[in-house]
Amino acid sequence: MVHGTYLLFGPLLKKFAWSCSKDGGHVLSLAILIHLHTVLTARALAGAGSAGGDTSLSPRQLSRNFTYGALGAGNGSLSGAWYRRNQIHLFGVLLAILGNLVISISLNIQKYSHVQLAHQEHPRPYFKSVLWWAGAVLMAFGETGNFAAYGFAPITLIAPLGCVSVTGSAIISVMFLKENLRASDLLGMTLAFVGTYLLVNFAPNRTQPISARTVQYYFVGWQFLIYVISEILLFCTLLYFHKRKAMKHMVILLSLVALLASLTVISVKAVSGMITFSVTDKMQLTYPIFYIMFIIMIASCVFQVKFLNQATKLYNTAMVVPVNHVFFTTSAIIAGIIFYQEFLGAAFLTVFIYIFGCFLSFLGVFLITRNREKEHLSQSYIDFGNIPGKQTLDKIQPDSNGLSYGTLPDGSDSTQSQSGEKKEV
């Protein structure tokens, strides 16, 4: 009865409430109407859930139950109603932020272990270092936090929070590894924090239980089928240029990583969501779709790491990290919008501010990683052209692995070619 009453009068109440607010009506009457609409919405949802016996609803039904942005009375980002409505998403955000901070700590621990091993007289392999394994364990904990976060919040909210890892790594490296803190680092951190705040406030706050039936519904949807076919064609084209034409450009490698990452985040959210649904409501691990998504998750992760390692071997890490962050985040957001329809019914202003928050976080990551590796690559050399009374075109480079100070580049050839000549001033 209540459900039918809401379906009949709910839209009329919303239109009348907004018309009152536009015409300057009484605030009290507007508040009463909004409260009545909220109560009817809650009761209608409760009635629908109890009648159906399954909390898995179609996207058209789900889109009616979600609100976007900070519209209406009491919906501001600092109000108690906003926190009550978004507490599940905030828990996912907290897991993602903590996971990314733990990852940044683990990366700095592993970096510190590599520095220690490099200064030893007889360096051992890094995998025999206890400190390196401690970083690896922390990395596993951080990735577990990120994995669990996808079960509580939308992809479009969790994926951009990867900038927290870059920002946290820069702060920790300054504190513990005694690296220089540059003005661009401070500006980048500020932009990343502002972007993160906008992302958390204006990402879709759509509470969608991820059950096996929901994943199956999305998996056979025409939107996802068109998206997968397009992605496969693009992936095969890039792979052809990479393998057959031997094109090793960073954009090609990181585009391959991003295309795989879109499948990774879709499957990760499906697996994590179904595990969360199994713990809180009804067992979902007996459905075949769970194991299909699990296989997709593992396979896409393996090949994603393969192409990412190729990029880091060929190009500077300071170039790979920001470009990969932008490509990965963009691909993940598009995947969340198409597969899980996370921006269904969102207002234009909300989408615009969300995109602006992504842009600020991207810019912050670029500023933090800009020219960072080059500070450690500069090695001194002796130029004989600067020695009075001497003149030569060769430079002696320090040899850190030997007992001698250094050797001439392409030593024997260059010295033999000039053995019969004497250079005088």
Image: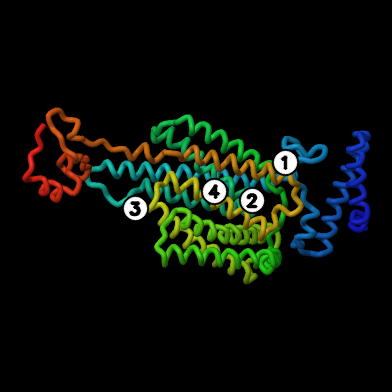
Q: Is residue 343 above or below residue 224?
A: above
What is the quadrant of residue 107 in the picture?
A: top left
The residue under label 2 is 156
Label 2, residues with CA under 10 Å away: few <14, some 14-19, many ≥20 = many
Residue type indicated by callout 1: Tyr
Viewport quadrant of the C terminus: top left
The residue under label 1 is 83
Residue occupying the point 51% across, 67% down: 236
Q: Which mark is residue 326?
A: 4
Inspect this view and state whether residue 283 appears.
no
Q: CA distance from mark 1 to mark 3?
A: 45 Å
Q: Nearer the viewer, mark 1 or mark 2?
A: 2
Q: Quick one: SS at disc 4?
A: helix
Q: CA distance from mark 3 to mark 4?
A: 31 Å
Q: Is residue 219 above or below residue 383?
A: below
Upstream in the sequence, badge 4 or badge 1? 1
Residue type indicated by callout 4: Val
Q: Quick one: SS at disc 2?
A: helix
- Residue 298 appears at what percent x and percent y? 51, 63
Residue occupying the point 78% across, 60% down: 60
Inspect this view and state whether residue 102 appears.
yes
> Which sits in the foreground, 179 or 56?
179
Q: CA distance from mark 4 to mark 2?
A: 13 Å
Upstream in the sequence, badge 1 or badge 3? 1
- Residue 218 appears at what percent x and percent y? 69, 64
Left or right: 322, with 35 as reference point: left
The residue under label 3 is 127
Q: Nearer the viewer, mark 2 or mark 3?
A: 2
Q: CA distance from mark 1 to mark 2?
A: 19 Å
Q: Residue furthest bottom?
A: 288
Upstream in the sequence, badge 4 or badge 2? 2
